[in-house]
Amino acid sequence: MQSHVQKLFRQCLYIVLAVIFSYAANADEVSRDQIKGLDEQVQDIKKDVLNLNSELARLEEKLLFPSNTQVSLFISMNNGDDFRLDSVQLKLDEKVVAQHLYSFRELEALQSGGVQRLYLGNIKTGEHDLVVSYIGKAPAGGEYKRSGTYRINKDVGPKFVEIKIAGPETTEQDIKFRDW
């Protein structure tokens, strides 16, 4: 669906460019006021196309992920945790729904208190098993692997679950789950 929005955006842009070029090709002498007016029209059309693109993206999300079946899974870390998170994998009902390899900037954001939406999808009401596995490096340099499970109780309406990951140097539980 995203490619459809991009195609629509490109088509609008091609139409605007075609109008500009055909106008320029047919004009022998174009006054500055006419050029200025045409430039303003192009800018207005560009704004309209961008607004249309964002509205289409919102509609697409509403159609693909209706709020009564929507589930969102978020990843966070403890503030100031020196643990280096390398990757995370999420399984929902024994099916891998998300995997992510972390860049330095993403890790920095998580360590500073940021939250990342790692998965947005649809599930039926009822109970669902979530398995979270992650790999990272301890401050001492050793590889650190952990997994945790959580039972999601999905009711009618959107469901939001935070998955808080802790490194080996903390005395807390490795993975904590919290419903929002």
Image: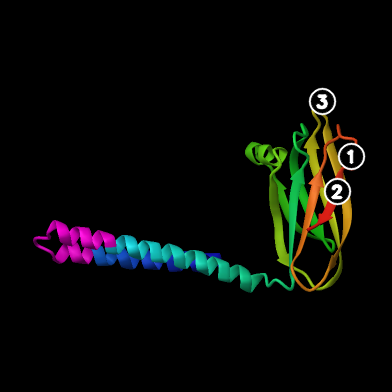
- SS for tag 3? loop
Identify which residue is drawn at 70% across, 71% down: 67
The residue under label 1 is: 172
Q: Name the amino acid, label 1.
A: Glu
Which residue has dot 3 on it?
140
Crowding at dot 2, Cα within 10 Å, few <14 / some 14-19 / many 20+, comes out as some
Which residue is at a point 19% across and 66% down the rendered structure image?
23
Q: Which mark is residue 24?
A: none
* Residue displayed at 85% across by 40% down: 145
Distance from the alpha carbon under mark 3 to that under mark 1: 18 Å
User: Around disc 1, counting alpha carbons within 10 Å, would you say few (fewer than 14), some (14 to 19), or many (20 or more)?
Assistant: few
Give the left or right position of residue 130, taking residue 73 as reference: right
Residue 86 among those drawn in magenta: no
Front residue (pair 20, 172): 172
Residue 26 horizontal/vertical position (percent) = 14, 66
* First to last magenta residue range: 21-40
* Residue 2 % position (x, y): 54, 65
Separation (CA) of disc 2 from disc 1? 9 Å
Q: Could you say which quadrant of the image residue 79 lies in?
A: top right
Q: Quadrant of residue 78?
A: top right
Q: Residue under label 2, please give it.
A: 176
Asked whether, in this view, residue 174 is left or right of residue 83, the answer is right
Distance from Cα at disc 2 to Cα at disc 3: 23 Å
Secondary structure category for the residue under label 1: loop
Sooner in the amino-acid sequence: mark 3 or mark 1: 3
- Indicate which label's residue lies in the foreground, 3 or 1: 1
